[in-house]
Image (cartoon, rainbow, N blue to C red):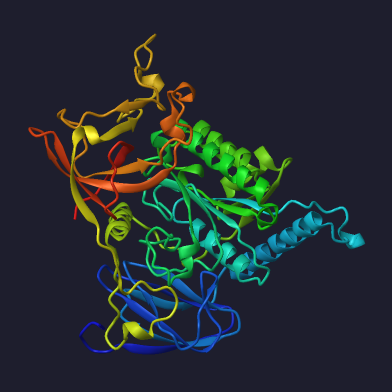
Amino acid sequence: MASEGPVETREWTLDPETEYRFELDPGTSLAVKLIRGHAEVFGAELAANKPYLFGSECKAAIFTWRGCTIEVTGQPSTEYVSEETPMAAYANLHMAFEQMRVRALRDLRGSPVPEYEREKPTDPPRVLVLGPENSGKTTVCKILINYAVRAGQRWSPLLINTDTSEGGWAAPGALSAAPVHSPLPTCSPASPLGSAATSAPTALSSNALLPLAYWYGHAESKRNPLLMERIIRNLGENVTDKFQVDLEGRTAGLIVDTPSSFAAGPGSSSDDRHRLIKACVDAFKINVILVVGHEKLNVEMQRAYSSLLTVVKIPKSGGVVELDHLYRERVHNYQLHTYMYGQIIPPPAGISSASLGGETLSDLVLSPSSTVINFGDLSIFRIGAETMAPSSALPIGAARAVSETQAVPIDPSQPGSGLLNAVLAVLAPPVNTDESERYDEEILDLPISGFIIVTNLDIPHRKMTILAPNQGSIVGRTAVVGSFEWQE
């Protein structure tokens, strides 16, 4: 059903290589319909005469290469047309990466090579995107991925998300990777990379996305750099294994999105930053580093890596919005609510849900399960101490009692367990069930199979109530708690 109220519809005519930018307030939605010409949202092409719905404080842009007319319904808090965009630079990057993919595929198939290309490398693009906060890194990744899957060559590049404040296809606090087969939609920051197969209806093409996810559990990489480094290397090993059995898939390459703390920021150690960047370079065998709009970081990367790989500074879009801490917290709530309940974006007045285009989630409703379990049914751990003082702050000669990567068991019956309203990542069972081959830090290397929320603790009866997106049993499973909490 469309929402009640007056219909606010306007037409915007965009000149070639311009974009219509908008920002939404909480509780509002916007519908954009392409009337004439061609247009795209972060590299994903719009179908003509189909309204595309945006909500949950979405901030996006409709770009056109050749000019177009769009019809906009709804009332954004900000809307304007910009003639200054970095899209030409991004398109040039795409063309360079496309040539790398073609050379890699030609080399794999043993096809003849033109004489002028015989000296060129045959590695596919393996790209690391770096930049400070509010620089538009994720948008750059989406544009490059969407152009690759639109190229008509049946590429399925890997998109790897190491920005735990964003969560990607999982929930905030996770690092994940997935091969992308169809353009990634943009309709809500609650699903920044589209919906995964675990939570999307089969009607959506993004249902093909089966991400591999690991749990870090915090929004900031500086909270536990050793754990972050280990997870990055775990993802890298999985990517290497995949490429060894899927040689044609390897030729599409990969793109790695990173948190802003990899660039610089208050409280982030330069040593930790460089160690995590090096972990990404090594784990994913990076051959191109893109630095989005940051001169100092570009110089740092040139100095450290220019002899080993290509470092390119690319412009930051003028449409990037400065996002404050409260906005990011609201987005985390949107993401967790969407994970449990699905996502409904009510269309603005005058727009029918049946007419919507793209992968707009106007009626995706899930039915989560609230279950009471015994304390002993689930093994719960926290990785490292909850608040980890730097080594320099410890008394002289003192050793840290709990290492950053030690799995510490949590007793729900103890005061201060921190489990009420906590987000728990339920881990996949160990692949090897032979007890003689188990090891102490095995929990760190197990991927996520899903998330639950602890909604009530009944300490006298040693029971807890959990909210899960489905009714599957978790008895005997292992879960890890981080610093994320969620309440309805």
- Image quadrant containing the C terminus: bottom left
Whether residue 347 appears in this view of the structure is yes
Q: Residue at x 34, y 42 (%)?
A: 426
* Front position in the image: 176 or 3: 176
Residue shown at 40%/40% (left/top)?
216
Q: Residue at x 34, y 43 (%)?
A: 425
Q: Measured from the top left, where is residue 14 in percent x and y? A: 51, 85
Q: Quadrant of residue 59?
A: bottom left
Q: Position of residue 240 (x, y in %)?
A: 63, 43
Residue 381 lies, with reference to residue 8, above or below; the image says above
x, y percent for residue 63 = 52, 76
Compared to residue 367, the image places residue 238 above or below, namely above
Where is residue 394 shown, x and y percent of the image?
35, 17
Q: Write down the quadrant of residue 79 in the picture.
A: bottom left
Seen as rendered, the residue at the extreme right is: 115
User: Where on the picture, by quarter, is residue 280?
Assistant: top right
Residue at 55% from the left image edge and 65% from the top image edge:
143
Q: Is residue 194 left or right of residue 57?
A: right
Report whether residue 316 is seen.
no
* Along the viewing direction, whichever of 128 and 320 lies nearer the viewer: 128
111 over 355 or under it: above or below? above
User: How many numbered discs sit on the rendered protein?
Assistant: 0
In the image, taking residue 157 as reference, residue 323 lies left or right, namely left
Q: Residue furthest top?
A: 397
Along the horizontal axis of the image, is 106 left or right of 363? right
- Quadrant in which the N terminus appears: bottom left
